[in-house]
Each structure stands twice: as structure tokens, then as C-alpha cells.
């Protein structure tokens, strides 16, 4: 019997089941063990092998009798061993426990004190959480499919235009969005946006914004009231002003995002745009030289009534226009810091001999390599156009 009164008090009054095992038999147990095993009294438990209160097999298929001997041996060798186990009540109900075995001598005999912590409620909660996570995962996958369904499905079929894009969110749902679409037989609308934050909230907002901007939306700011319901060539400044008015009208609900919205006349090669806090686009000439493009405003949703100015420039034959999200220049290397725009420009210049889609693929590969062994912690989004009289449209990457 035990001689330490304090230890005896803990043994008898603990809420966890305590059992003393001497040799291969249970020689003592507390009231919590009697209750846990649905026993009538200690006498239903004492002098029995612990494996008798276990199912024949454990979940991994091993014999409870053989595996319990292994666990006991480890505890005696190390002095202490903890593991999960399935025990069986006298009434036959199997339940999970966390077993802690401590090796010591009691009255001069090598013994084990076993503590069984009932995991029934924890395992039920874990199972509920697993089911909820599985359901959430399916819902996120469905939402991701919906979000990707808003991306352009093919390059606009205009003579002298090649377009390509890559959308690679850092998680199931991204806060970036892009589109390129016909306004008429000569003009294209194109945009790329980046919502502050990540996850479901950012994704929902990006989808909402694309509803305003994309031509198939009834609420689109570029849709005219023309009798034939054709898309009007709304100036980019007008589109962005309306967006800013809408998303900054409620000071209690902060919804900020950067946006580059442009109208491109393929015939005249004139690009008119507004950049609302978005990274400056990059133009790469046919010779591989870069041309600076200047931004023109603050992110949308920051300041109601902000006056966004529109910029127009003329592209040259063979020019490539690259739009991108800040997930590229701000991608971090564990040892080399940020990727930066200068490195992006240099890479785009070096890939000028490649097809447009291949140049985008090279950027994504380099950014991924830059971040290793980690992954990019922001969405990677690219939209590119090339103007050349003889080029054919190109399928996006």
C-alpha cells in the first residue's frame, strides 16, 4: 500500500482514473476509475490484466494484449510513457483515453501508475470540427470556382492584339481580380484590382467590384442606356469616380482596394487609364526596353470625393503592356528580401523574345523560386497585352 498521504489523497480524489499495476495485474484504483469503467466497485477491476478493459484490437489493427505489453515495457525503460489508447467499459462500450504510465517501486515491487484521461468529449469535438472543416473546404472550393468563373475565358478577338493572364491566389480565394473585354470593334476595357486583405471577405469584395466593372453585369458602370444595349466608352476617370463614390460612401464600412482601369483603342494604340493606388504598369518595347508608366491616385475607398486624373499615352507596334498585383514585387525571399519592381522589369525585358503567355509563366516560376522554401504570401496576378499588326490572339496561361 502507499505510504505518502499527500499522494494517496491525490490518487483517491483525482477526476482522472488512476490505477496501480504491479506485475501484469491491477492492484489498486481510485473511484474515478470505477466510474469510468462503469464498474460496481473496485473488486470488479482489481486482479485483472489492463488489457481485459480493452477491445481485442486497437484502431491500428494491433492486438491490445501485445501492444499493452510494449507500452508497459517502454514506460519501465524510460520511467514515463504517454500515448492514446482505446479502453472498454465493463458494459462493453469502447472509449478513447490518453494513458500516462509512470514507473516506480511500491512497497519494494516494480509497479506502474496508470492515469487514464477520458478523451470521449474531445474526440467528439474533433470529429465535429473535422466535419465542419470538410464542409467549409467544399464551400471554399465552390466559391473559388465561382471566382475563377469571372475571369475571362478567352482573349478578345481583335486584329493586332494578343492578350494573356495568370491568376494564382495564395489560398483558395484571392483578393485580386482581372478582366479584359470588348467595348466595341476597336476598343477594349481592361482592369486589374487588389482588395486589401485576404480570404473570404477580400474575395467577396473583389467579386462585387468585378460585377460593377465587367460588361455582363447589369450594374456595370460602363453599360450605357443605348437602345441596342451596347457598351458605352465611359472614360476611365468616370468609372473610377463612381466606384470611389460607392465604396467610400459609408465611413463605418471600410472597403479599400487598388485598381488599374483602362480603355485601349487597338486601332490607334491609345491607352487611357486611371491607376488608383495600383502598382505602375510596365511597358516592354519590341527591342526589350522598358517604358515608365505613371500612376495617378490613391486606393479606392480611402477618401470620398477624391479627384482621379486620367492619363492617355500611345503605344508603339510591338509594345507589351503588363499589369500585375503587388504580390509580385513584394514577394519575399527568406534571405534576399523583396523581389521588387526593378527585378520584375529586368525579367520581363529578358523574356521579350518569348511568346506573351510564356513570359508570364517565367515570372511566376521566378517568384516561386524567389520565395522558397516558403510560398508567396500574396496573390500572384498578371494581365498582359501585346499590340502588333500581324499577331494572332493567344490563349492565356
Image: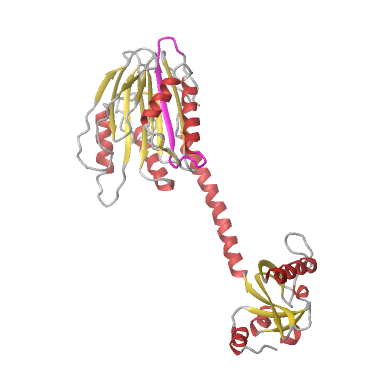
Residue 136 position (above or below residue 343): below
Percent of width and height locating residue 209: 35, 38
Q: Which image quadrant for residue 164?
A: top left
Residue farthest front in this picture:
108
Q: Which image quadrant for residue 21?
A: bottom right
Percent of width and height locating residue 55: 76, 69
Name the residue at 59% across, 80% down: 15
Q: Magenta segment, which residues? A: 372-391
| 120 horizontally vs 295: left or right | right
Percent of width and height locating residue 49: 78, 77
| 19 horizontally vs 376: left or right | right
| Image quarter in which the N terminus is found | bottom right
Which residue occupies the foreground of this view, 199 or 365?
A: 365
Report the number of numbered marks: 0
Q: Which image quadrant for residue 190?
A: top left
Percent of width and height locating residue 285: 37, 16
Amino acid at each position: 500500500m502507499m505510504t505518502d498521504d499527500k499522494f494517496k489523497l491525490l490518487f483517491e480524489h483525482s477526476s482522472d482514473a488512476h490505477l496501480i499495476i504491479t506485475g501484469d495485474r491491477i492492484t489498486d484504483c481510485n473511484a474515478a476509475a470505477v466510474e469510468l469503467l462503469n464498474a460496481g466497485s473496485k473488486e470488479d477491476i482489481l486482479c485483472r490484466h489492463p488489457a481485459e478493459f480493452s477491445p481485442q484490437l486497437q484502431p491500428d489493427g494491433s492486438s491490445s494484449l501485445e501492444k499493452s505489453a510494449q507500452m508497459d515495457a517502454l514506460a519501465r525503460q524510460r520511467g514515463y510513457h504517454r500515448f492514446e489508447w482505446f479502453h472498454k467499459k465493463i458494459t462493453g462500450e469502447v472509449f478513447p483515453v490518453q494513458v500516462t504510465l509512470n514507473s516506480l517501486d511500491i512497497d519494494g515491487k516494480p509497479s506502474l501508475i496508470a492515469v487514464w484521461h477520458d478523451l470521449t468529449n474531445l474526440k467528439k469535438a474533433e470529429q465535429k470540427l473535422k466535419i465542419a472543416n470538410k464542409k467549409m473546404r467544399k464551400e471554399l472550393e465552390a466559391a473559388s470556382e465561382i471566382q475563377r468563373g469571372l475571369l475571362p475565358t478567352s482573349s478578345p478577338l481583335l486584329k493586332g492584339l494578343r492578350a494573356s493572364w495568370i491568376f494564382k491566389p495564395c489560398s483558395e480565394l484571392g483578393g485580386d481580380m482581372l478582366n479584359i473585354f470588348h467595348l466595341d470593334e476597336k476598343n477594349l476595357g481592361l482592369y486589374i484590382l487588389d482588395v486589401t486583405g485576404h480570404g473570404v471577405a477580400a474575395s467577396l469584395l473583389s467579386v462585387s467590384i468585378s460585377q460593377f466593372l465587367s460588361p455582363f453585369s447589369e450594374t456595370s458602370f460602363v453599360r450605357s442606356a443605348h437602345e441596342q444595349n451596347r457598351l458605352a466608352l465611359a472614360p476611365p476617370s468616370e468609372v473610377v469616380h463612381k466606384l470611389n463614390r460607392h465604396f467610400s460612401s459609408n465611413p463605418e464600412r471600410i472597403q479599400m482596394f487598388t485598381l488599374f482601369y483602362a480603355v485601349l483603342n487597338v486601332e490607334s494604340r491609345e491607352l487611357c487609364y486611371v491607376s488608383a493606388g495600383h502598382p505602375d504598369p510596365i511597358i516592354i518595347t519590341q527591342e526589350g526596353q522598358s517604358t515608365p508608366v505613371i500612376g495617378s491616385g490613391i486606393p479606392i475607398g480611402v477618401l470620398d470625393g477624391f479627384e482621379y486624373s486620367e492619363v492617355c499615352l500611345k503605344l508603339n507596334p510591338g509594345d507589351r503592356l503588363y499589369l500585375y498585383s503587388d504580390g509580385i514585387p513584394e514577394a519575399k525571399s527568406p534571405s534576399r528580401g523583396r523581389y521588387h519592381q526593378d527585378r520584375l522589369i529586368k525579367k520581363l525585358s529578358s523574356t521579350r523574345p518569348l511568346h506573351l503567355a510564356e513570359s508570364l509563366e517565367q515570372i511566376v516560376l521566378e517568384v516561386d523560386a524567389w520565395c522558397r522554401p516558403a510560398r508567396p504570401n500574396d496573390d500572384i496576378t498578371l494581365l498582359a497585352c501585346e499590340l502588333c499588326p500581324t499577331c494572332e490572339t493567344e490563349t492565356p496561361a
